[in-house]
Structure formats: C-alpha cells, structure tokens
Amino acid sequence: MSVKIGFIGAGSLVFTRQLVRDILTVPELQNSTIVLTDINEEYLDMVFQLIERDIRANNLPTVLQSCPDRKEALRDADYVINAVRIGGLEMLKHDIEIPLKYGVDQCVGDTLCAGGIMYGQRGIPAILEFCNDIKQVAKPDCLFLNYTNPNAMITWACNRYGGVNTVGLCHGVQHGHELIARAFNLPLEEIFITAAGINHQTWYTEIIHKGRDLTGKLLAAFEANPAIMRTEKVRVDMLKRFGYFSTESNGHLSEYLPWYRKRPEDLKNWIDLGFWINGETGGDLRQRLESRDYFVEIFPESMKAEPYRYKSEERSNEHASYIIEALETGRIYRGHFNVVNRGTISNLAEDAIIEAPGYVDQNGINMTQVGDLPLGCAAVCEASINVQRLAVEAAVHGDDTLLRQSMLLDPLVGAVCNPPEVWQMVDELLVAQAEYLPQYSEAIAASGERLDSGPLISTREGYRGAARIEPKTEEELAKKKELLPKIPTDTSISDFLSRLLPDLLSHSLSKKLSDIEKVDLVIVLEADSQIQSYRYHGDKDIESFNSETENPHLKLRISQDDLAGMIRHEELDLILKLLTDINDEKHEIINTLNEGLSVCLEDDENRKYRFDLLFNGAQKTVLTIKLQTTVAKAIANEGGNPITFFESGALQLEGDLNFAMVILPLFQ
C-alpha cells in the first residue's frame, strides 16, 4: 500500500528522523511518499539529506520529498504530522522572563501558566492556517496528528475552528508508564495501565500486573526508591494527596498547580536541579539556548555516521507510526490520545480536549469510556480546562479580555499575582510578541500606550528566579570544545590506570569521593574469566583490591580486551570527556544512586566496546548508553551536551529511560 504523509516543522533532526524511521519499520508503509516542509530551508535541507541517506541505506522504495511550499507539500496527503514551534527561542525567552518579573517562576512554559497561554496565542492562528491548507488540498479524510504544544489548546482549536479531524499526541503517558515499571522493578510489557485526564495532567487510575491491582501500592514503591523521591517530589506529593500518580514531569507539573512554585524560598524543596526538567527556573529555555547551534555544527559528522537501521527493535514508543499502521493494516493498537471529550470522561467538560485510552484499527480511532475521574483529580483538570477554553477563544478571536481572564484564572499566575499585575503583565507580553500576534493588533496598540503613559506597577526587573542555572556563555561553550589529551595507542593497561585515575578524579568528584571512609573508586578489569581490581584513594595511590569482600562507592567494570581496544583506537578520550565533566552541584546524584549503567561504544569500523558503572555496590545494569564514537568525539569538540548527542543519532538509550533522566546530568 502507498500513503502520503506530510511533516510540518520537519526541520527538527531528532524528532522527524525518528518518526520517519518508526513509520518505515512497518513493511506495508515502506512504499509511502513522505514530504517534509519547514520555514527554515537550511534545516529542512539537512534533515532531508540525512533521512534520504537512511532510506537508501535500508534499500527502501520510499519516496522522500522536500518542499518549502507548505500547501504544495500537503497536496493529496493522507496524514499530516505537525511539530512546529511558533516564535522560536526569542519568544520563549519572553514567555519566561516577563512573567518572572511578576513572580511567576516557570520551568518549561509550554502547556499552561503564562508561558503556555502565550505559546498558544502564537500557535493557534498559524496552525489554523495549516488546517485551511489541509481542507483545500489534502485528502478529504486526512488525519492531522498534532505534536505541538500547548497540545490541548492547539488540538482544541483545530477541531473546533479548523474543521480538520485532529488528534493530539504526546509521550508523557509512556514515560510515566516506564517510571512506574521501574518503581516496581517489573518489565514494562507486563504492566497494564489506564491513564485519563488532560494532556500533561493525566492520572494513572489503573496499574495492573498479571491480574493484580498495584495502583494502591505505587506510593510505597516510590518511597523505596531514593532517586525517584529526589527527582519527582511534586508528583509524589500529588500522589499522596490525591491518591493517583500524574504525568508529565516534576518541572512540568509544578507550574500547572498553585502550590509548589509560588514562594521563592520554598521552591527548592519541591524540585531537583540535577536535570532541568525536574524544576529548574527557565530550565527548558537554558538547555535550548546552550544547544541552539548544534545542528549546523554536527551535521557534517552526522552524515558520516552510520545511517539509521529501520528495524522493529529501533522503533520508538511515539504514537504516530502505530496509529497510521493500525488505520492502514487493521492491526489493533492501544494508546492514549488527546481528543474532544464527548463523554469519554463523564465528569469533565464535553468540549474539552481530554487524554484517555483508545483503540485504533481500520475502523478508526475508538476511545474507551472512562467514566468519572476521581473527584479531586477531576477538579484539578477542570481548573486547567477553564484556562484552556478561555485561551483558545482569546487566540481565535483576538480578544485580549479573555486572554487576561485566562491568565487570572491560571492556577500559578493566580496564586502569585493580583488582578492589576496580571493586566500589566499581559500588556508587556502582547507588546513583546506583537510580531506573532496579528489578531491582537488593536489590543497591542492600546497596551503600548498604557505602558508608555503609566503609572506602572513596580516589578522585580532583572529577577532571575528562585532556582536558576545561568546558560553557559559563548566563552564557556567554546572552552568545552577543547579535547582531553590523546592517550598514545601503545599505552599499556598499567600505564593507562596510572593516567586515567588522576585525570578521572582530579575534578570535583575526587574531592567528594575522598571523604568516603571505604573505597573511593574501584576499577575492575575482567579478562579470561579472571578479575583484577584496583582501588584508588584521594592520595592517588593505586593498589590491588578484593572486590569480592568489599563494596566500593563507585565501580568502573570493563573487560581487559575492551579496554585495550579502546586505548588502541583512542576511544578513551570520550570516556574521559563523559566521566570528568562533573561539577560540584551534581555530586549528590552519585551519592544516592543505587543502580548502574552500561556504556557501549561503537567506532567508525563497527568495533564495539563496553564498560559498566556501578554505584553503591549495585550489580544490576538498568540503562545502556550506545555511542557512535566518531560522531560523539566531533560533538564533544564542538561543546555538545547530551541533547546534542541524542539529536545527532550518536547516542541511543536502552533500558530504563527514567534512570537516564538521573544519570545524564553527570555528563553535561
């Protein structure tokens, strides 16, 4: 069979490339036509080159096209996938910085709160234009799959005003499912979940393992896991108080509620600064600023790396490909989708966009009847739904009164600001974002006059927030491009140890580990079923160590053959880059980890090496990191961070991805 799939906002390397791989792992879809479109023609061309190379390497008949003309790209499309960001980093900065002057401290700002509301004001008019194009030139029954945030608001506007059948897609439920499986130490595929609510506030109302209901046991499972208790404080607290666990992440959820971010002196009690999504002030903005030029910088090396393999085991858990497969082949797929409620959740508003389980086959997308949400959970969702409804109507009609009311009713904004402050904050936001808000032209002129004439309410000009990590400067980013000294290829194992350990522990990690009474670090070499262990103390002495009788705090386990191979082929530069770039703020992550990870290196000649890091005596490896070293070294040269590694295809994760959220900050 052959279908046509259009991608709007295709200039995103990691997302577009992964979704294309997902689709083309399905044999029946490999004869499809895929058309990419984006307003950034430079990025569009680079993504096209990478995906075209992937398709050729997999010997597929797929037709791939690049078309800057959006309307033409959507002609005769059966499916359209939307992943745009309207306004870019400049507008995201306004979404975060202007509300911060009024005390509204956000981590992400893309779903609710002041940032999410303004993101919707920019996105809805643009995406309604996409809907017009779809109605005019796509197939009459074209399905619009929306990944753009604020997902509920965009999907609401498309269905109510765009006249196009639109389903909102998100991976929040899948990520929460993975966290639940990790908490219970059970295989993901053995846990059946039902989640219902609204996007990013979806409640896990049912957790079943082989017929046994685990829903009421989740809190105890979380409390037994130190890493989860450190990184998910808001979500665990909501579970305690409402009885059910909620998506999306700690940072996301904290800004949708009135309780956790309203007092600056209290905020750090509810968040974790080990990884931005756990609640850092402006965390999403910071990580985007630091990686803003990654694509152009790493593109040449990405083209030299191994092409993507289109195999089922490489398929992600993003819903889009499974929906298309089910509709086209009849294979049944169950997922959680964002759709118009129409009674699916009986105690939420009929017109709201809800997120709930649905089944897909050749008959379409069929939502299950959830019934009532628990009363408290429904009340939390309804507070957000009221904000979404006002924001959608404001964006469609250019009604700044509704916009101000949506801000006033937003849980966090309302907890921090009084009405005059909200009105002035909206004036500032409208004027700053005028370029992307044509529907507000009259209101923007009036806002500008008020701001010019005064008097104005005093604000905290220059306030950076209660939990801010400043973006790295250009100089700091440039400094990260410096490679560590090369290790000669003829280095012996003993020479390696004498060189590796001082380098490894000469940074802040050595200071922290040197305070530990027992063994600071143990290197375990495995060769021919024999194990050699060496220990390292703060005085940098290296000596033999019996790993069978004592548990070290941190253990690096590696086979001698792999170690020798990495030395010969200079892959140890990359290991050193990963392991030494640890700063003082992150040492507590190591101190509380009770699990391990494996790092697999694959060089440009397909040689594969592996080492394990085990913490606090753990023997279990719960996460595997795969690196293509040629690309990864180039990224390290350019000052790349973990996001850069992901998006280039140089880094892939297998296993517990929630553990990855804890461990990856060590490598930033």
Image: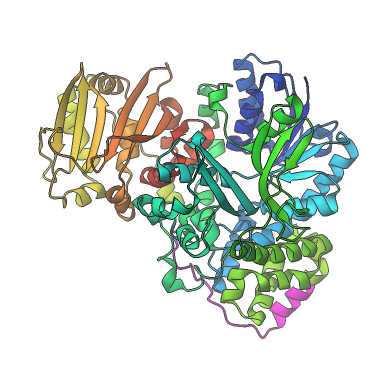
**Percent coordinates x, y for residue 514 in the rendering:** 16, 49
At a point 29% along the width and 47% down the height, the residue shown is: 590
Q: Nearer the viewer, residue 339 or 170?
A: 339
At a point 74% along the width and 24% down the height, the residue shown is: 329
**Percent coordinates x, y for residue 563 in the rendering:** 26, 23
At a point 16% along the width and 52% down the height, the residue shown is: 515
**Percent coordinates x, y for residue 316 in the rendering:** 57, 33
Q: Is residue 371 left or right of residue 568?
A: right
Which residue of the protein is positioned furthest toward the front in this rendering? 211
- On screen, 23 above or below 251? above
Q: Is residue 358 left or right of residue 394?
A: left
Q: Is residue 280 left or right of residue 91?
A: left
Examine the structure image and report whether residue 457 is included in the region drawn in magenta. Answer: yes
Q: Nearer the viewer, residue 439 or 346?
A: 346
Examine the structure image and report whether residue 586 is included in the region drawn in magenta. Answer: no
Q: Nearer the viewer, residue 9 or 45?
A: 9
Q: Which quadrant, please, contains the C terminus?
A: top left
Can residue 320 be seen? yes
At a point 64% along the width and 69% down the height, the residue shown is: 410
Which residue of the protein is positioned furthest toward the bottom in this rendering? 455
Tell me which corner region of the image, top left, top right, bottom left or bottom right, holds residue 429: bottom right
Can residue 491 be seen? no
Q: Nearer the viewer, residue 72 or 178?
A: 178
Which residue of the protein is positioned furthest toward the top in this rendering? 59
Q: Is residue 350 left or right of residue 619?
A: right
Q: Main secondary structure of the magenta part?
A: loop
Magenta region: 445-470
